Amino acid sequence: MAKKYLTREDSIKYLNEAFYGHLATVHNNQPYLVPVNYVYH
């Protein structure tokens, strides 16, 4: 799967529109996903 990069403007837009997200990675060919809450100022 190709990497997809967000522009700074898109990143700020997404951060301002929500208060939670998901942080994901892969270890030993298995996905690992953690829900996160945040506040963007």
Image: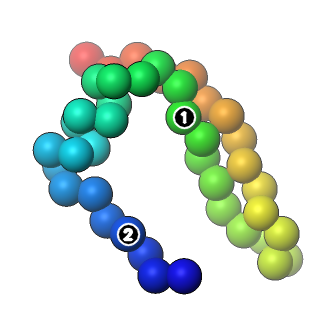
In terms of secondary structure, where does tag 1 sit? strand
The amino acid type of the residue labelled 1 equals Gly
What kind of residue is marked 2?
A: Lys
How dense is the environment of label 2, judged by Cα within 10 Å: few (below 14), some, or many (20 and up)? few
Q: Which residue lies furthest to the bottom in this view?
A: 1
- Image coordinates for residue 17, horizontal then vertical, percent: 33, 24
What secondary structure is marked by label 2?
A: loop
Image position of 38 with respect to 34: above or below: above
Q: Residue furthest left?
A: 9
For the N terminus, give its image quadrant: bottom right
Q: Label 1 crowding class (10 Å Cα cut-off): few <14, some 14-19, many 20+?
A: few
At a point 67% along the width and 34% down the height, the residue shown is 35
Give the number of the disc on residue 4.
Answer: 2
**Left or right side of 18 for 27:** right
Q: In this view, does 27 lie to the left or right of 12?
A: right
**Which circle's residue, 1 or 2, is located before the other in the chain?**
2
Compute the Cα span from label 1 to label 2: 17 Å
Q: How many marks?
A: 2
Q: Is residue 6 above or below residue 36?
A: below
- Report the side of 19 relative to 4 (left or right): right
Residue at horizontal 43%, vertical 75%? 3
Looking at the picture, how far across and down is residue 19, in whole percent? 46, 20
- The reply to whether discs 1 and 2 touch (Cβ–Cβ < 8 Å) is no
For the C terminus, the quadrant is top left
Indicate the colouring scheme. rainbow
- Tell me what residue is drawn at x 46 percent, y 82 percent: 2
Q: In which quarter of the image is residue 27?
A: bottom right
Residue 21 numbered mark, or none: 1
What x and y, as percent, mark residue 7? 19, 56
